[in-house]
Amino acid sequence: MSPLIWVGLLIYGLSVALWLWVLAKVDLSVAYPFVGVSFLITMAFGAFLLDENVTLPRMIGTLLIASGCVLVGKSA
């Protein structure tokens, strides 16, 4: 019954509602690659909030994912 678990469940529920709203507005083939943006957010939170070590290969991989998201967005 931890409050943090309830907050996590609330955030998850909001993300599901947001995802369904996005899918109602755009094609799945355009929306789904943007799930890769979560890699950017996760790396940023890990580095800044959890003081995780961000190595060069991890940074390059994350930037490749981000550039793929941009390319897909431009093709829409």
Image (cartoon, rainbow, N blue to C red):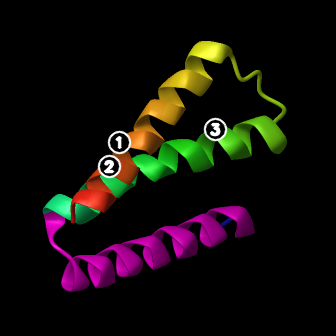
The amino acid sitting under disc 1 is Gly
| Distance from Cα at disc 1 to Cα at disc 3 | 17 Å
28 lies above or below 69: below
Q: Residues within 10 Å of mark 1 (few under 14, many from 20)?
A: some
Which of discs 2 and 3 lies nearer the camera? The answer is: 2
SS class, disc 3? helix
Q: Is residue 4 magenta?
A: yes
- Residue holding disc 1: 68
Q: In the rendering, at what x and y percent does residue 21 appear? A: 31, 84
The residue sitting at 22% across, 58% down in the picture is: 75
The question of residue 42 being in magenta is answered with no
Q: Identify the residue under disc 2.
A: 71
The spot of residue 42 in percent (x, y) is 60, 44
Residue drawn at point x = 39 percent, y = 52 percent: 70
Range shown magenta:
2-28
Q: Is residue 60 left or right of residue 50?
A: left
Of labels 1 and 3, earlier in sequence is: 3
* Residue under the image location 60 percent in, 64 percent down: 8
Magenta part, dominant SS: helix
Estimate the x, y position of residue 74 in percent, counting from the top left.
Answer: 30, 60
Looking at the figure, which quarter contains the N terminus? bottom right
Nearest the viewer among 14 and 60 is: 60
Q: Which badge, 2 or 3, comes first in the chain's sequence? A: 3
Task: Residue 43: give its label.
Answer: 3
Q: Residues within 10 Å of mark 3 (few under 14, many from 20)?
A: some
Q: Quadrant of residue 24?
A: bottom left
Q: Is residue 31 above or below residue 58?
A: below
Q: Amino acid at mark 2?
A: Leu
Is 74 in front, or is 7?
Answer: 74
- Asked whether disc 1 touches disc 2, contact meaning CB atoms under 8 Å apart, the reply is yes
59 on left or right of 30: right
> As shown in the figure, which amino acid type bears the numbered disc 3?
Met
